Amino acid sequence: MTSANSSSRSRYPAGSLAFPHRGLLGLAGLAPHEILFLLDEAEQWVELNRQPTKRVDHLRGLTIINAFYENSTRTLLSFEIAGKRLGADVVNMSVGQSSVKKGETLIDTAMTLNAMRADAIVIRHASSGAVRLIAEKVDCPVLNAGDGQHEHPTQGLLDALTIKRAKGEFVGLKVVICGDILHSRVARSNILALTALGADVRVCAPPALMPADIERMRVTPYHDFDAALKDADVVMMLRLQNERMTGQFIPSPREYRHLYGLSVDRLARAAGDAIVMHPGPMNRGVEIDSNVADLPGRSLITTQVEMGVAMRMACLEVLTRKARKLEGWQ
Ligand code: CP
């Protein structure tokens, strides 16, 4: 296994910071080489996670707090596993049993976590911008685990890592992202990562679920899924984000499936070796048929989950280097 320090030192001049950011609030504003740096860093953790013993002590003595104000299976568990595999003490704040329920504000909660001298805080929140607000109030790195409709940066990174390992490179790769683009922080972070890395990104949604100014994100919008799928190398399906919808955005789940669901027949319009992705949670039989979600060799949905642990290990390891006085930090 390559050590975290030697791999980054070999790629960057002595004294430079390969990832000069205090936290990870989003992928907007990251340079392509910074995204590639994080993807490269994750490779060693993919290898470690495939060993019988999956633990190192890089983060020994550090405390990581996960504060999830919204439900999560994959992101919360993978951040917890990632921190523990790196040797940190990981604490999950139980928001439902916390003083948030007694009216404590987000900022007071942040200042409380800060006073406990957390070394990294991972936050999921229903409001776009809430994570940035907390990051401004605390002394340690903050990692955005999904904030409202804004960003889900580690999801964008783990998806990019999955694509890189399956397809080798990004330049010219035809990636279709289909579903509720309007409400999806996953779509936003993926668009930012994949366009930065040179992919040809097509987004597909019913008119009501497509942001009006989406072309500004350097993607091609489609309402016709069959047309979007033509020769695609990667097909990424998103669920309808019902929890963020106010009012009726689609006529019915049945009609949505007819027009925008990924079936085996529809997948045949993509390239013969196209991969299928979904960030989860899936609604089988709505945006994706079960036999596509489970298609051997083509569906990488469980690989995405595996990459999620490695990617979050990379982010935690890189962002705590300053606290550990590594990587050129003064
Ligand atoms: N993809 C994702 O964010 O899943 P969870 O909501 O289960 O964390």
Image (cartoon, rainbow, N blue to C red):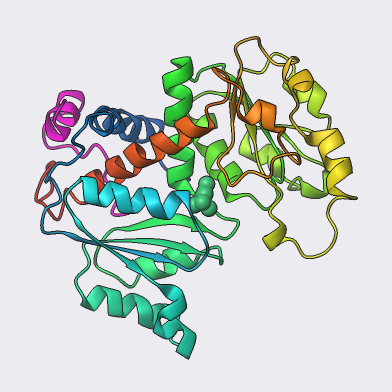
Q: Residue furthest bottom?
A: 102
Choose between 56 and 210: the one closer to the eye: 56
Can residue 236 be seen here? The reply is: yes
Q: Which residues are magenta?
A: 1-25
Choose between 25 and 288: the one closer to the eye: 288
Q: Main secondary structure of the magenta part?
A: loop
Residue 40 position in % (x across, y down): 30, 28
Can residue 25 be seen here? The reply is: no
Choose between 174 and 72: the one closer to the eye: 72
Question: 226 above or below 248?
Answer: above
Residue 13 position in % (x across, y down): 15, 28
Residue 156 position in % (x across, y down): 48, 40
Q: Is residue 308 left or right of residue 116?
A: right
11 magenta-colored = yes
Which part of the image, by quadrant, shows the N terminus? top left
Residue at x 48%, y 24% (from the top left corner): 163
